[in-house]
Amino acid sequence: MTSKTILVTGASAGFGAATARCFAQAGWRVIAFARRADRLQQLAEEFGANIHTAAFDIRDEGAMQIALDALPAEFRAIDVLVNNAGLALGTAKAPHCDLAQWRQMIDTNITALATLTHHLLPTLIERRGAIVNISSVAGTYPYTGGNVYGASKAFVTQFSLDLRCDLHGTGVRVTSVEPGMAQTEFTLVRTGGDQAASDKLYQGAMPITGHDIAETIWWLANLPPHLNINRIEVMPVTQSFAGFQVARAG
C-alpha cells in the first residue's frame, strides 16, 4: 500500500481507464476525471475508497475548477498528473475538414491540458511530483488527414520539453509519452462510431493496448526520483514510418 496519489484525465476508456486500474490495483489513490459518469461509476464500484471520480467535459474550465475544489482532503496531495484526455476527429484532408472539429481538438488536446497542468503546478512542485503527457507519434510523423490532430500532439510534446526547462530545480519530472497505433476507442471516436473502419484498421496488426501504456506510465511513476525520461515513443512492431509522397506532373 502506498500513500501516493495520481490524477488521470480521460479515465473512462482506453489508456486512461487502464492507467486508473493499474494504479488503483497497486494501492495508489486515484483521481479519475472523464466525461462519462457511468464508466467512472464502474471504477468507483471496483476500487471503492481508493478512487475518487468526477464527470465533466475537460474543456469546461469552470467544471474543472469545481472538481478540483471538491477533492477530498486525502486526495489533494497529487504526486502524478497524467494528461491523457484527448481525441482525433475526422479523417479528411485539410480543405474538407469541419472547422468545429478542429476547434474541439485544440480545446481538448491543447487548451484543457495546459489549463489543468497550470492549476496543479503548485501542488506538483510541493510534492516533487511527475507530469506524464500523452502525446502521439502523430506529433512527429505527419500523415494524410492528421492535420490538426498531429499538430495538437506536437504541441503536447514541445510543451512537455518546455515544462522540463521551467521546472528545472524543482524536482518535478515531466515525460511525453508518444504512442503509435493503439486499439482503444480512438478510431471509433475519430470516425463517428464506424466499427467496421476500426476493425479494418487493427485487423492482424497486433497494436498497442491500453494495458501496454498503463504499464509504461507505471514504470515512469516509479522510477527513482533522480531520473527523468524526457520522451518515450512506443509503436507496435508491425507499424513503421510512412514514405514520402510525390505528386507528378502530367
Image: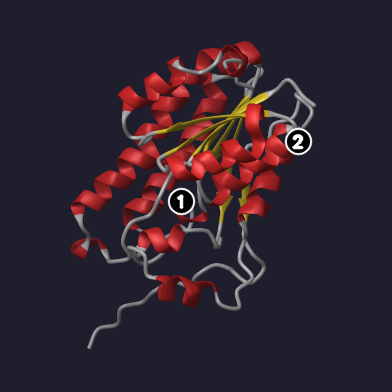
The residue closer to the viewer here, 33 or 222, is: 33
The residue at the point 55 percent across, 16 percent down is 72
> For mark 2, what is the residue?
26
The residue at the point 61 percent across, 66 percent down is 207
Viewport quadrant of the N terminus: top right
Instruction: List the single residue furthest toward the bottom.
Output: 250
**Residue 147: % across, % down:** 33, 57
Horizontal placement of 196 versus 206: left or right? left
Q: Given contact means CB atoms under 8 Å apart, are the residues at marks 2 and 1 in contact?
A: no
Horizontal placement of 162 versus 98: left or right? right
Type of amino acid at the residue the image marks with label 2 = Ala
User: Dot 1: few (<14), some (14–19), or many (≥20) neighbours within 10 Å?
Assistant: many
Viewport quadrant of the C terminus: bottom left
Q: Nearer the viewer, mark 2 or mark 1?
A: 2
Numbered circle sitting on residue 139: 1
**Residue 155: % across, % down:** 42, 40
Horizontal placement of 69 versus 14: left or right? left
Horizontal placement of 141 versus 2: left or right? left
Q: Secondary structure at mark 2?
A: loop
Whether residue 139 is visible here, answered yes or no, is yes
Numbered circle sitting on residue 18: none
Instruction: List the single residue furthest toward the front.
Output: 45
**Residue 208: % across, % down:** 62, 60
Q: Earlier in the sequence, mark 2 or mark 1?
A: 2
Type of amino acid at the residue the image marks with label 1 = Gly
Alpha-carbon span between mark 2 and mark 1: 32 Å
The residue at the point 46 percent across, 33 percent down is 159
User: Dot 2: few (<14), some (14–19), or many (≥20) neighbours within 10 Å?
Assistant: few
Q: Secondary structure at mark 1?
A: helix
